[in-house]
Image (cartoon, rainbow, N blue to C red):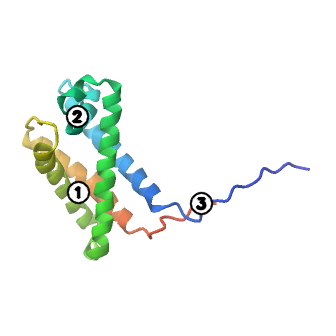
Amino acid sequence: MPVRSPSLPLSPALPMLFWLVLLATGAALLDLGVAVAWFGAQGVPAERVFQSIATWVMGRSAYFGGDATVVFGGLLYTAVLCGVMGLYRVLARRLPLLLARPITAGALYGALMYLLIFLVLVPHVSAANPAPHPLIWHALCVLAYALLVGIPAALLARLPAGGLPARA
């Protein structure tokens, strides 16, 4: 007689928070990959990209914090993108056009969020003193945010409140 292991009850749906964190983590990794490739081509080590995000909170001391500030920068950036993607969902509940046109609205939202975060908030609110970057860098980042942040945020906003059904 075969032995059966007991089954654990599965949630009928994976919660929205799961999908939000999953998409934000993926977007953060891909977007940071763009930054690592760009700055790596200029001889900047990958860890500096993550530490530069940590400077938003820690100031220049983040560059001397080693692996701890690399991890902190990655987690901070993921948290920021969780907020950006969650905000789209909140806004979409009040502005149905954001749900009706997810690709267009999401891309515009992503571009706007890049401009707001990196050209307004980081220079004026954070502990960082960011160096100026060429226009081509900002154009690349706007495109990355449109594709990697805004559109996934818009598609996430279209999911039902309980998220996607779990697979059996």
Q: Is mark 3 on a helix, strand or loop?
A: loop
Is residue 100 visible from the viewing direction of this image? no
- The quadrant in which residue 146 appears is bottom left
**Residue pictured at 15% horizontal, 54% vertical:** 116
- The quadrant in which residue 147 appears is bottom left
Are there few (<14), some (14-19), or many (20+) residues within 10 Å of tag 1? many
In the picture, measured across the screen, residue 31 lies left or right of residue 112, that is right
Q: Which amino acid does label 2 sit on?
A: Met
In the picture, measured across the screen, residue 13 lies left or right of residue 92, that is right
**Residue pictured at 29% horizontal, 39% vertical:** 32
Which label sits on residue 162? Answer: none
Badge 2 or badge 3: first in the primary sequence? 2
Residue at mark 1: 110
Badge 1 or badge 2: first in the primary sequence? 2
- Spatial CA span between label 2 and label 3: 42 Å
Which numbered disc, 1 or 2, marks the residue closer to the eye?
2
Which numbered disc, 2 or 3, marks the residue closer to the eye?
2
- List x then y, in percent, for residue 83: 30, 55
Which label sits on residue 58? Answer: 2
Q: In this view, does 92 lie above or below 31?
A: below
- Spatial CA span between label 1 and label 2: 26 Å
Residue at mark 3: 167
Are there few (<14), some (14-19), or many (20+) residues within 10 Å of tag 2? some
Q: What residue type is labelled 1?
A: Gly
**Residue pictured at 42% horizontal, 51% vertical:** 22
